[in-house]
């Protein structure tokens, strides 16, 4: 048996998210961080703008797949060893509206007021590319928020936690107190659905 048939390829994580790093580590799967070129929101691999008429399912899958392909390009540019690139994207949908990362504190407060007392969807797409093929999986969960008072929203926005998160909240942080009920994948809501990711990596030959 050749060495190439027994040693799995390197896995590169194309994400800035510390939450995704923690979750991938939880799988027990070794990985390397794939460095970006610029500051957050300045990397030109993929636009996260929603296209006209694009629904949440299509949007989040497109962005995750584009991030994986962008990661493949960076492997070549940086002359890193060949391997798999894993990327993910998470978005929140309420009544057909995609709620991405807030532009500022007023936008964050607006989103939280929309979510107050309502049930919304959280979608996370995970994509893996090995330069020959690109596949993705989609995790969809529902989350119901308690009714929030304005002081709850103001205090949470003042904490700074909502600013880099889809829908202006992180279930693993202070906003966990707002959640009355979830249906689906908790880790998917955090940002990397472990079961779906495990299944996808196995399809690419990883021993996850």
Image (cartoon, helix red, strand yellow):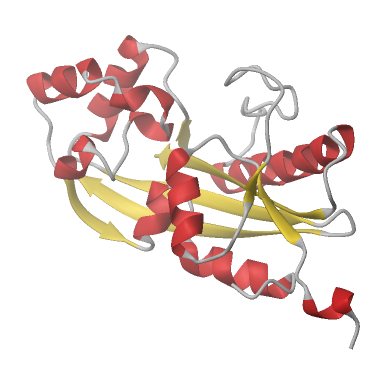
The part of the image, by quadrant, that contains residue 39 is top right
Vertical order, 95 against 105 (above or below): below
Quarter of the image with the C terminus is bottom right
Q: Residue furthest front?
A: 3
The part of the image, by quadrant, that contains residue 31 is bottom right
Q: Residue at x 17, y 39 (%)?
A: 117
Q: Residue at x 68, y 40 (%)?
A: 34
- Image coords of residue 116 (percent x, y): 20, 34
Relative side of 90 to 106, left or right: right
Vertical order, 163 against 141 (above or below): above
Q: Residue furthest bottom?
A: 1
The part of the image, by quadrant, that contains residue 136 is bottom right
- Image coords of residue 132 (percent x, y): 90, 58
Relative side of 5 to 31, left or right: right
Q: Nearer the viewer, residue 7 or 178?
A: 7
Q: Nearer the viewer, residue 151 or 57?
A: 151
Q: Nearer the viewer, residue 34 or 44?
A: 34
Q: Residue at x 71, y 46 (%)?
A: 65
Vertical order, 197 against 121 (above or below): below
Q: Nearer the viewer, residue 186 or 86?
A: 86
- Image coords of residue 180 (percent x, y): 16, 51
- Image coords of residue 8 (percent x, y): 75, 70
Quarter of the image with the N terminus is bottom right
Relative side of 58 to 75, left or right: left
Q: Residue at x 31, y 33 (%)?
A: 169
């Amino acid at each position: 048996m050749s060495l190439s048939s027994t040693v799995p390829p390197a896995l590169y994580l194309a994400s800035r998210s510390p939450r995704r790093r923690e979750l991938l580590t939880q799988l027990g799967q070794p990985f390397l961080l794939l460095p970006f070129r610029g500051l957050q929101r300045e990397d030109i691999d993929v636009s996260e703008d929603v296209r006209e008429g694009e629904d949440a399912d299509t949007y989040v899958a497109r962005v995750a797949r584009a991030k994986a392909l962008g990661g493949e390009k960076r492997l070549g540019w940086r002359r890193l060893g060949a391997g798999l690139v894993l990327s993910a994207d998470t978005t929140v949908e309420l009544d057909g509206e995609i709620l991405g990362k807030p532009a500022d504190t007023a936008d964050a407060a607006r989103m939280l007021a929309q979510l107050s007392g309502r049930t919304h969807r959280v979608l996370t797409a995970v994509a893996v590319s090995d330069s020959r093929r690109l596949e993705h999986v989609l995790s969809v969960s529902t989350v119901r928020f308690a009714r929030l008072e304005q002081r709850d929203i103001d205090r949470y926005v003042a904490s700074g936690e909502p600013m880099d998160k889809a829908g202006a909240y992180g279930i693993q942080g202070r906003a966990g107190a707002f959640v009355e009920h979830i249906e689906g994948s908790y880790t998917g809501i955090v940002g990397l659905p472990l079961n779906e990711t495990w299944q996808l990596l196995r399809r690419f030959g990883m021993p996850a």
